[in-house]
Image: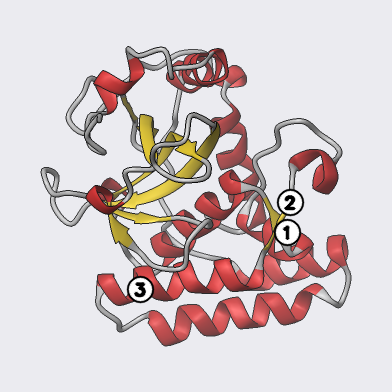
Amino acid sequence: MISPLNFAAAAKTKHFSSFFKATLVALMLVVGALQVAAVDFVRMQAQLSARFGPAAQGSFQDWQKLLQQSADSTPPAQLRQVNDFFNRRIRFGEDQEIWGQSDYWATPMETLGRGAGDCEDFAIAKYFTLLLLRVPEEKMRLIYVQASLGGVNSRITQAHMVLAYYPTPEAEPLILDNLITDVQPASRRPDLLPVFSFNAEGLWQGATGARGTGGPTSLSRWQELLRRVRAEGFD
């Protein structure tokens, strides 16, 4: 069995599907850094209300409470609190159902406004929420994986995204996943076969693999997401 940390080896196997290859190419064009220096909550709330109606205000206010209550917590506690918040509040749904598109990466405010999202939306919302809690972005990566359905020995897999937290650069990451409640170390998730990982600083084929290089910004779904996140108030 491939180690949960052996992303580079996983990328060379037959499990590295055409879907992942296409996404990897798009992401390697540019990932783009996001520096969260300030947050305009007033603008966020106004845009959320205008787009999704008054019903979205409750979710936004609960999200603000999460940030306030978790501000002084330790990083492990923050991971659990953020993971639990989104796993309990957000309903899982496919992009076609929610957004009328086959593959759409929602911003945190869009996910809160809809109250629904797919695996990418869960991971993205958790990532930006933890950034606001001052968890360093270099300690977090969004990871594309092949998830085994029906148990680790199942041959049925699907493309999936999780969020990983690295206490130190060489440490085993902790996995935040919408499929399970607990935040677990990667070694306890043999059902996940990592393919590649990325954050706002770069893209990796493994825990210590080579980073992607820059390129045209218009072809990156991640870059487009960062643009929309900034427009929402993550300045």
Q: Position of residue 43 (x, y in %)?
A: 69, 66
Q: Quadrant of residue 33?
A: top left
Residue at (56% x, 33% y) in the render: 158
Residue 225 lies, with reference to residue 129, above or below; the image says above
Q: Earlier in the sequence, mark 1 or mark 2?
A: 2
Q: Secondary structure at mark 3?
A: helix
Q: Which mark is residue 116?
A: 1
Badge 2 amino acid: Gly
Find out whether the residues at labels 3 and 2 contact each other: C-beta distance under 8 Å.
no
Q: Secondary structure at mark 1?
A: strand
Badge 1 amino acid: Ala
Q: Quadrant of residue 46?
A: bottom right
Find out whether the residues at labels 1 and 2 contact each other: C-beta distance under 8 Å.
yes
Residue at (39% x, 17% y) in the render: 214
Q: Nearer the viewer, residue 166 or 9?
A: 9
Badge 3 amino acid: Gln
Name the residue carrying label 3. 78
Coloration of the structure image? secondary structure
Residue at (28% x, 28% y) in the render: 7
Name the residue carrying label 2. 93
Q: Position of residue 76 (x, y in %)?
A: 27, 71
